[in-house]
Amino acid sequence: MVIDGRKIAEVFGEQIKERVIKIKKRGIDPHIALINVGDDPASKVYIAKKEKLTASVGISSTVYKFDDDVKENELAKLIEKLNLDEKVHAILLQSPLPKKFQFQKFVDLIDPRKDVDGLTVINQGKLFSGEPGVIPCTPQGVLHLIHSVQENIAGLHSVILGRSIIVGRPLAQLLLNANCTVTILHSYSHNMKSVCQTADILVSAMGKPLFIDGEFVKPGAIVIDVGVNRIEKNGLKKIVGDIVFDDVSKIAAALTPVPNGVGPMTVAYLMHNTLNLAHCH
Ligand code: NAP
């Protein structure tokens, strides 16, 4: 079975639209600030998508673009200004930043109450300790997709490939909260294939094109492909995930495609989090 992330995100988007109508009736106009530094082509595409989709549900946005050579204090000043701006409910600093910037240092300048992707150390700590806070968008989207196949996942073995603060680590917390047994694999892990073969739920977030073939997958597993990799094949540029879709689809019970798997859910949860922050305003 193919898990159609685009369709699931569309249904979720309809609920978000309803919430936007309700919050606007209360006189609140939800607004997100999107900050893009440098000229990473993928980031430009993501920012444009986020701008368009938020507008489609009635959430307004402002995009702030900086060149690679922006001074650190200029970026810091913008974040401070947005923190104080009552009209701005959510701030997203698009990753990656150019190499000279330390991403976490700038994320931590964001007021945790406006930290829409839940990446400040305050929100990371809250998730880790089970306190209410902002939860990163992509892991929430991944969990939603898993639940679309199976509501009760308690006791299942989830294996996550990747331990970044954006995907792997927060997802591990969410799956623990759902009472899964959780294993995280990373670039120092041994016996990756045999560990993956024990996964009832396998999530790949490595950014390694077509790394996971059918041999990694337990028959009947739920497989989620977070990876977005730009490759060139026969002179054509294309986007692929970490997973060899055709191969794994013969073995897994359910599998997300790339594109139209996790990507649309990430944007849907960006809107969901923006609304939650606007509510708390
Ligand atoms: P990242 O920060 O580069 O982290 C990659 C993780 O994968 C690291 O933990 C790394 O291990 C691990 N890894 C890399 N190669 C490995 C290997 N050969 N074996 C085992 N582990 C390996 O990347 P990220 O920001 O989490 O993103 C991961 C992927 O997801 C990228 O393709 C990104 O574009 C995509 N993504 C998609 C969405 C979406 O909405 N669809 C959202 C976010 C990210 P170490 O920690 O040991 O280095």
Image (cartoon, rainbow, N blue to C red):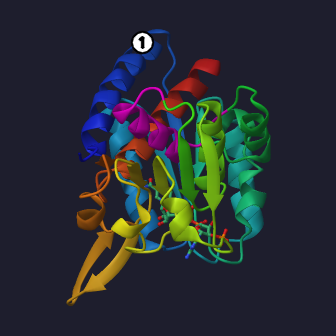
Residue at x 51% of width, y 38% of height: 140
Q: Which residues, given as a range, are shown in magenta? A: 134-152
Residue 81, given in percent of the width and then of the height, sits at 71, 45
Residue 199 is situated, as x and y percent measured from the top left of the image, at: 50, 52
Viewed as shown, does residue 34 lie left or right of 24? right
Q: Nearer the viewer, residue 23 or 6?
A: 6
Residue in the picture at 50% in, 32% down: 153
User: Furthest-bottom residue in view?
Assistant: 235
Q: Quadrant of residue 242?
A: bottom left
Question: Residue 197 versus residue 270: which sits nearer the camera?
Answer: 197
User: Could you classify mark 1 by the number of other residues whose Cα lies within 10 Å: few (under 14), some (14-19), or many (20 or more)?
Assistant: few
Asked whether 194 or 138 is in front, the reply is: 194
* Left or right of 278, for residue 4: left
Q: Secondary structure at mark 1?
A: helix
- Figure check: 85 above or below 76: above
- Residue depicted at 32% across the width and 52% down the height: 252
Q: Report which residue position mark 1 lands on.
A: 22
Q: Provide residue 213's location: percent of width, then percent of height.
A: 36, 70
The residue most toward the top is 26
| Quadrant holding the C terminus | top right
Which residue is found at the position 59% from the left and 45% from the top? Answer: 171
Viewer can see residue 96: yes
Q: Is residue 149 magenta?
A: yes
Is residue 213 shown left or right of residue 153?
left
Quadrant assignment for ligand 1:
bottom right
Coordinates of residue 46 in the picture (x, y in percent):
41, 58
